[in-house]
Amino acid sequence: MTIHESLGDRGILELVMDNPTVNALPIADTRRIAEVCDAVSARPEVKAVILTATGRGFCAGVDIKEMQSMPGNEGILGVNHACFEAFRAIYECSVPVICAVNDFCLGTGIGMAGSADIVVAAEGARFGLPEVDNGALGAATHLGRLVPEKHLRWMLYSCVPVSAEQLLAWGTVLKVVPLDDLLDTAREVATVIASKDPTVIRAAKKSLNGIDDDISRSYRYEQGFTFELNLQGLGDEARAAFMRGERDPNSAVD
């Protein structure tokens, strides 16, 4: 398990992804994020959650090697179910979730950041969905919470990422700071939230979700196309090319 969990004295729960070299998330770790976020409902001592990562980047997406090692459709089914639950749990978490994004945030990372309440990022961080190049679809729902609709379409069709600085200009990232200041900045944001009445904050989170669009429904709709493409063999072809070393499915990672 590469998800590290710690609870500070201010009630700030920190979840740190640590899976070198690029924080590609295995199925079990993706499910673990869902489990921890869901469990917050029964943990009144938790007042805010920070989701971040160590190493080269925030998240390069799913673990392609794990998927390809599993028989039949077990891999694609496991990944899609785990991602659905993780994104839902982050979004529905009883307290606000702050994503602190270091460097690249791709695929699964977009799903997590788009599901979170607040995003802070390191200077030069890149956000992208290389799904078309991977013979898959998904998380455009969550990307749409970070970028304008027309730019979302360009990013999905082209697989070209966008910078944290551009997201800051669009107002979907709260702060862009030097990498060395990233975690402290996320803690400062979480501390402000944690200083408020916890019952009111939990009610505020629930009320905001109640007036929002149903992102779980729209993401599940997207996943249906991923299943179709996989049945057509396109997803497997892309993953096989990655396994042969012919290309990197996460094109923003260099």
Image (cartoon, helix red, strand yellow):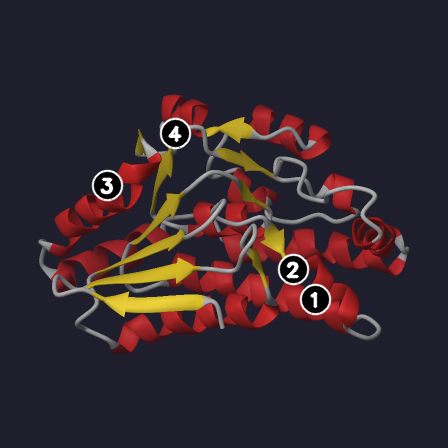
> In the drawing, what numbered circle is on residue 123?
4
Query: How far apart are labels 1 and 3 at the CA level?
Result: 34 Å
Q: In the visual, does 140 lie left or right of 209?
A: right
Quarter of the image holding residue 250?
top right
What's the residue at 84%, 73% (across, down)?
Answer: 72
> In the drawing, what numbered circle is on residue 185?
3
Q: Residues within 10 Å of mark 4 (few under 14, many from 20)?
A: many
What's the residue at 43%, 67% (across, down)?
Answer: 3
Tell me the amino acid under the disc marked 4.
Answer: Glu
Kindly check if marks 1 and 3 are in contact, taking CB atoms under 8 A apart as contact: no
> In the drawing, what numbered circle is on residue 248?
none
Q: In the visual, does 175 lie left or right of 243?
A: left
Q: In the visual, does 17 lie left or right of 117?
A: right
Q: Earlier in the sequence, mark 1 or mark 4?
A: 1
Q: Earlier in the sequence, mark 4 or mark 3?
A: 4
Q: In the visual, does 8 lie left or right of 165?
A: left
Does the rendering let one see residue 148? no
Kindly check if marks 4 and 2 are in contact, taking CB atoms under 8 A apart as contact: no
Residue assigned mark 2: 63
Residue assigned mark 1: 66
Q: Quadrant of the C terminus?
A: top right
Asked which secondary structure carries label 1, the reply is helix
Q: Earlier in the sequence, mark 4 or mark 2?
A: 2
Asked which secondary structure carries label 2, the reply is loop
What's the residue at 53%, 28% (across, down)?
Answer: 162
Tell me the amino acid under the disc marked 2.
Answer: Asp
Kindly check if marks 1 and 2 are in contact, taking CB atoms under 8 A apart as contact: yes
**Residue 37 image offset from top left, x and y in percent:** 37, 67
